[in-house]
Image (cartoon, coloured by chain):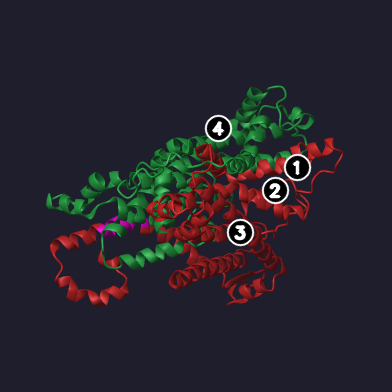
Amino acid sequence: MATATVPTPTRSADPPRRRGLTVAKKRQYRAAYLFVLPFFVIFLAMIIVPLAYAGYLSFFRRQLIGGVSFVGFENYAKALTDASFLSSVARMAGFLVVQVPVMLGLSLFFALALDSGMTRLSKIIRLGIFVPYAVPSVVAALMWGYLYGPDFGPFAQVAGLLGLPAPPFLTSTGMFFSIINVVNWEFIGYNMIIIYAALRSIPPELYEAGRVDGASEKRIAWSIKIPHVRPALVLTVIFSVIGTFQLFNEPNLLRTVAPTVIGNAYTPNLYAYSLAFVNQDVNYAAAIAFLLGIVIMALSYAVQLWNQRKENRS
Amino acid sequence: MTATATPTTTPLADPPRRPARRGEEPRRRTSLLLTVVMVACLLYFLFPLYWLVVASTKSNADLFSTFGLWFADLNLLDNLRSVFTFQDGVFARWALNSVIYSVTSAVGATVLATAAGYAFAKYDFPGGKALFSVILGAVMVPTTALALPTYLLFARAELTDTYWAIILPSLVSPFGVYLMRVYAADAVDASMLEAARVDGAGELRIFVTVAFRLLVPGAVTVLLFSLVATWNNYFLPLIMLNSPDKFPLPVGLAQWQSTAAAGSGSQALFSTVITGSLVSVIPLVVAFLVLQRFWQTGLAAGGVKA
């Protein structure tokens, strides 16, 4: 059992060494494989197999006449010229550029403010900012949808009292920013906590000296604290990239209050969903999902590469 | 305030490296401006929840006719009654389903991730590094890209529209394995394992009786975050499930919401949707507040070495 899971590269180098292994070492290896095995079985079944299956499906097409046939990269070629798909990806790229810096900038600011010890009520503030993370995104989108709405949303009510028109939260231009607001509300606290946890683990000696010398908190934050939490920041950037391109829940819920604004290709994921379950075109949907995965992996990899280069330079 | 507040949050995080750091500097100047800014931001984050509480106490008519940010006639009990009786009390069923899905998945995911993370951290076994990097790479695989092929595979195995359709995919937490590996590397001392081995304890026994206790704060973090992920999951159950009696809360609430928004003849539904939302939010908020000591420590470990 244990040897079966050893990947090929090490196997060739194994026999000469293995003879020298003590019985105790062998027993430890066997234990290690047993500890990893349950996770790995589920990992294979729930991640690797579906991934491979999506790749496989994406090379076929179901036709009215002739059934399913192999079409090579045709689904991908179709996706790359599909205006609906491309505009949804472009919208998410815009979302990434606008939303992620605002979210992570605020998360970092809050984390630094709480860590500086210059804020009163810091414990309550920390928990209060984090609490939205525990709210299901369906409920978050639902609440904000009502708040934005013209029927009994407080913003429209206040505007009405002042004799102003209702604010354009749910119009085609407003919606982009309305969704950004919902996502920010949900995830600023989560990212803040990750950064804050990293800040708390910086040994204080590193900046106590600077404080004694009269360096300002701003200066300490910029030149000592931020460089030290860069690994945590990279983590939050990667998670945000992944989250953005998977956006589904918020637009799908806000759609119920603004059906004309959010079409079935507002985000790539909404598009893949409607292809698979409304149009029943699973092959094309698989190609879209696969392309989306590639975009996300490429961006995450670029973030890591950029980080490594910066790390080497410093 | 800050001096007393912060030490309680990190009591379990490697004490030797961090001597009560904030406790020794009680005279740090607080800034009024910063406090005001932060409290203003806090109000933004609490504002929708405040609105949710206020709106839950209103009848459907009052929702439309009274100001949204203040109370009208208290109608909370009637609203709760309608939440739990509408459509033959299906809401209670959804709540139960949510509990089943999230507790089973979270406990399973935590056990799997803890055992695997511990093995990666404490055993230098052939192929371990390669396996770990494959798992780490999977952190970047978008779960929604997986949901569609998983659905098709499950449809072939006739697993769609069953509890397994939600639980099985939720058992894998690559990030949990990563977090537990980082945590175990610090929390479990190698010499302690050696000592147990000299005493003749088997590896499994060492894990259960010696290592696991030290891994608890990390494991609680993984547990809590898997709990949230499954409790709040919408996309997977949306595509996997057809029968309303198998829905978890988010899918059920979303369905009520679209019925309410569609309008016709169901005008009384808004207050029901809103009160149901409030009920579905409460368990996790309470869990996070009660367990905050643990998850903040566990996250600290993950953040440092990320």
Q: Residues within 10 Å of mark 2 (few under 14, many from 20)?
A: many
- A209 sits left or right of A280 in the view: left
- Tag 4 secondary structure: helix
The overriding secondary structure of the stretch rendered in magenta is helix
Q: For the residues marked 3 and 2, what is the alpha-carbon distance in whole angstroms?
A: 23 Å
Q: Residues within 10 Å of mark 1 (few under 14, many from 20)?
A: many
- Tag 3 secondary structure: helix
Instruction: Residue under label 4, please give it.
Output: B92
Q: For the residues marked 3 and 4, what is the alpha-carbon distance in whole angstroms?
A: 40 Å
Q: Nearer the viewer, mark 3 or mark 1?
A: 3
Q: For the residues marked 2 and 4, what is the alpha-carbon distance in whole angstroms?
A: 25 Å
- A262 sits left or right of B166 in the view: right
Residue A306 vs B234, above or below: the answer is below
Instruction: Residue under label 2, please give it.
Output: A254
Q: Chain of mark 4?
A: B
**The C terminus of chain A appears in which quarter of the rendering?**
bottom left
Q: Residue furthest right?
A: A163
* Residue B8: image location, x then y, percent: 40, 38
Discs 3 and 2 share one subunit: yes
Query: In front here: B300 or B204?
Result: B300
Disc 3 vs disc 2: Cβ atoms closer than 8 Å? no
Report the disc number at residue A101: 3
* Residue B225: image location, x then y, percent: 46, 47
Amino acid bearing label 1: Gly
Residue located 65% across and 65% down the image: A89
Report the disc number at residue A36: none
Q: For the residues marked 3 and 1, what is the alpha-carbon distance in whole angstroms?
A: 27 Å
Instruction: Residue under label 1, please give it.
Output: A149
